[in-house]
């Protein structure tokens, strides 16, 4: 048996087209151009690349990119001042502060200072609390991406035996909440979990976000299960560098029913889900119904 490959690139391209269509509808029907402010502090090369690709994606769908660059020496007060301005600016519907921040700035202070209705990363405690209590919320982009990918395989997640491996605030924790909100039966595993292979073997759906290259082995996977691999790990073998997931893909593809590849699975969907969140935030702020994406 060979698993169906969940083609994140193709699914992301379809979603991007739907977001572009919805953006053009908002502009022509309401004169509303969704604006996303991306704030980068310092010149971390990886962060610069992420910010550039986010700006490109925003422009491509017809939204307005509003990038802000601050020097690495900026103080917390300076950054809070910029966020206050962006919170008050009606042309800005979404605010994203690229992490990690320089050591002199406390990310918790910064994330809590973003207006919850402009918090397109979904990291504000109010949005986290709304998600945890099943209320409408801006949900972090990677969990949104995972749910959309899962739904290309499963029409309904109701009662599905699901194992979430990882409990970070960015992926594992909000994804387990989002899965619960879909009425899946969710077990959460983390660094201190015992008997992980046995837990894996019971899961009809497994989502993995741990940051350990090819950690999940093929013989841990229940035959026919759906596997969502969030991991992005750079490994060097034989002098060549490449990106692999948290799941041993070559083994897993022989056992699973459906699986996301790395690269080309969750990654391409995550950035499009940032656009979805920006669209949602813009509609919310304009008092319009949520977008149909
Ligand atoms: P993190 O380090 O913040 O959290 C890792 C979590 O995994 C922790 O909760 C930890 O308890 C758990 N964990 C670690 N090792 C474990 C083990 N051996 N067994 C069980 N649990 C274990 O990481 P993160 O920010 O959640 O990211 C996880 C991975 O996902 C990374 O590879 C990251 O690069 C990737 N990521 C991908 C995307 C995407 O768009 N595809 C987005 C965000 C993160």
Image: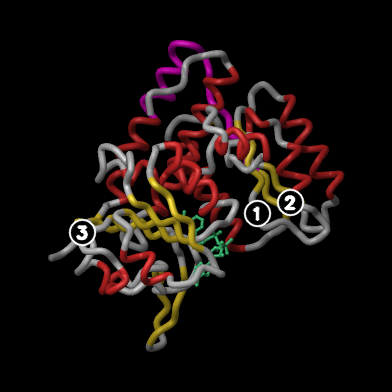
73 falls in the magenta region:
no
24 falls in the magenta region:
yes
| Residue 234 in view | yes
Residue sitting at x 87%, y 44%: 77
**Residue 224: assigned label:** 3
According to the picture, the residue beneath numbered tag 1 turns out to be: 99
The reply to whether discs 2 and 1 touch (Cβ–Cβ < 8 Å) is: yes
Residue sitting at x 20%, y 59%: 224
In what element is the residue under mark 1? Answer: loop
Counting from the top left corner in percent of width and height, residue 255 is at 21, 67
Decide which of tag 1 and tag 3 comes sooner along the chain: 1
Decide which of tag 2 and tag 1 comes sooner along the chain: 1
| Residue 66 in view | no
- Disc 3/disc 2 C-alpha distance (Å): 41 Å
Counting from the top left corner in percent of width and height, residue 204 is at 29, 55
Residue sitting at x 57%, y 56%: 168
According to the picture, the residue beneath numbered tag 2 turns out to be: 107
Give, as a single range, the part of the protein colored magenta. Answer: 20-38
Q: Residues within 10 Å of mark 2 (few under 14, many from 20)?
A: some
Which quarter of the image is occupied by the C terminus?
A: top left
Residue 26, above or below 49? above
- What residue occupies the far top of the structure in this picture? 29
């Amino acid at each position: 048996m060979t698993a169906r490959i969940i083609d994140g690139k193709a699914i992301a391209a379809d979603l991007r087209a739907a977001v572009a269509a919805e953006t053009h509808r908002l502009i022509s029907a309401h004169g509303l151009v969704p604006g996303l402010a991306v704030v980068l502090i310092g010149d971390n090369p990886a962060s610069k690349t992420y910010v550039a690709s986010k700006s490109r994606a925003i422009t491509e769908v017809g939204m307005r990119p509003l990038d802000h660059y601050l020097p690495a020496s900026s103080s917390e007060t300076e950054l809070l001042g910029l966020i206050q301005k962006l919170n008050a600016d009606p042309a800005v519907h979404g605010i994203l502060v690229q992490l990690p921040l320089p050591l002199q700035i406390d990310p918790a202070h910064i994330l809590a200072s973003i207006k919850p209705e402009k918090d397109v990363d979904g990291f504000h405690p109010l949005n986290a609390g709304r998600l945890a209590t099943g209320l409408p919320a801006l949900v972090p982009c990677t969990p949104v991406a995972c749910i959309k990918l899962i739904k290309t395989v499963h029409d309904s997640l109701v009662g599905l035996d699901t194992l979430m491996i990882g409990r970070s605030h960015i992926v594992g924790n909000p994804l387990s909440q989002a899965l619960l909100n879909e009425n899946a039966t969710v077990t959460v595993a983390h660094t201190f979990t015992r008997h992980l292979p046995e837990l894996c073997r019971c899961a009809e759906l497994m989502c993995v976000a741990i940051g350990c290259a090819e950690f999940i082995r093929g013989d841990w996977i229940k035959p026919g299960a759906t596997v969502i691999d969030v991991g992005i790990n750079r490994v060097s073998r034989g002098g060549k560098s490449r990106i692999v997931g948290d799941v041993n893909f070559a083994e897993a593809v022989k056992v699973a029913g459906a699986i996301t590849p790395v690269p080309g699975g969750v990654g391409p969907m995550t950035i499009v889900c940032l656009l979805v969140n920006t669209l949602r935030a813009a509609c919310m702020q304009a008092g319009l119904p949520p977008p149909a994406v």
